Amino acid sequence: MIDAPFREFVDSLAARSPTPGGGAAASAGAAMGAALMAMVVRFTVGKKAHADREPELQEALQRIERCQALLLPMVERDMASFERVAAAYKLPHDTDQEKVVRSRAIQEALAGAMVVPEELIHIVRDVFAAVSRIADCVGRNIVSDLGAAAELLQSGARSAELLVRINAAYLHDRDQARATLGRVADVMKDVRSHHTAVNTRVEALLKT
């Protein structure tokens, strides 16, 4: 899917089929946000005004590039995990034994379907953490891209959070569900805090 034409991906999202769905869209959006953030930093490195911050800028760029490389494959990873959920629900359940096997398969697939969106949220947090350290170096001429990147990242993380929550709602193991939701909530606090900090920089530059 990630090697398909963009139009094909968008048309697939619109189709009456379970995949690609919200998880794939969240992954693609976050990947674009990270890529756009990398562009912003690339236009910021090498500026004489921030020559003393060059090591920080280069480190931030490298961290964002690593995150970007992880995000794009999540489009297909999320699709694969959801397809396992769908396959589990299609298992036969006529006999008591079949019902037990099907229920176990569904529960395992639901737990697995939370892995990718939770990872996505952590990676978005890492991108924001890298950018927050050097956001004050970003100039006004590219601030709109900084803001756009931040919105894409925030949206991707929020979408992923919803996916974790819907899968957790159907888990029979409530301790596992609560633990996962607790981790996600903690990381989302960081994401929102970083997003606010970057957005503050954006608004400050747009007012000057």
Image: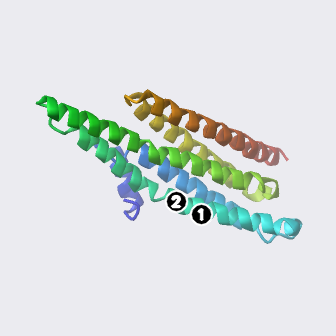
Give how far across and how far down residue 78 sits, in percent: 40, 49
Q: Which residue is mark 1?
A: 66
Q: Is residue 34 above or below residue 177?
A: below
Q: What kind of residue is marked 2?
A: Leu
Residue nearest the viewer, comparing 169 with 72: 169
User: Which image quadrant is residue 188 in?
Assistant: top right
| Residue at horizontal 63 percent and vertical 48 percent from the top | 125
Q: Is residue 152 above or below residue 103?
A: below
Give how far across and how far down residue 112 sits, in percent: 39, 44
Give how far across and how far down residue 31 sits, in percent: 53, 55
Q: Residues within 10 Å of mark 2 (few under 14, many from 20)?
A: some
Q: Is residue 106 above or below residue 125?
A: above
Give how far across and how far down residue 133 sits, in percent: 78, 54
Residue nearest the viewer, comparing 167 with 10: 167
Q: Are marks 2 and 1 in contact (CB under 8 Å)?
A: yes
Q: Is residue 134 visible?
A: yes
| Residue at horizontal 33 percent and vertical 42 percent from the top | 109
User: Which image quadrant is residue 102 in?
Assistant: top left
Q: Which residue is mark 2?
A: 70
Residue 168 horizontal side relative to residue 207, left or right: left
Residue 186 horizontal side relative to residue 30, left or right: right
Q: Secondary structure at mark 1?
A: helix
How far is the residue under mark 2 from the one under mark 1? Answer: 7 Å
User: Which image quadrant is residue 95 in?
Assistant: top left
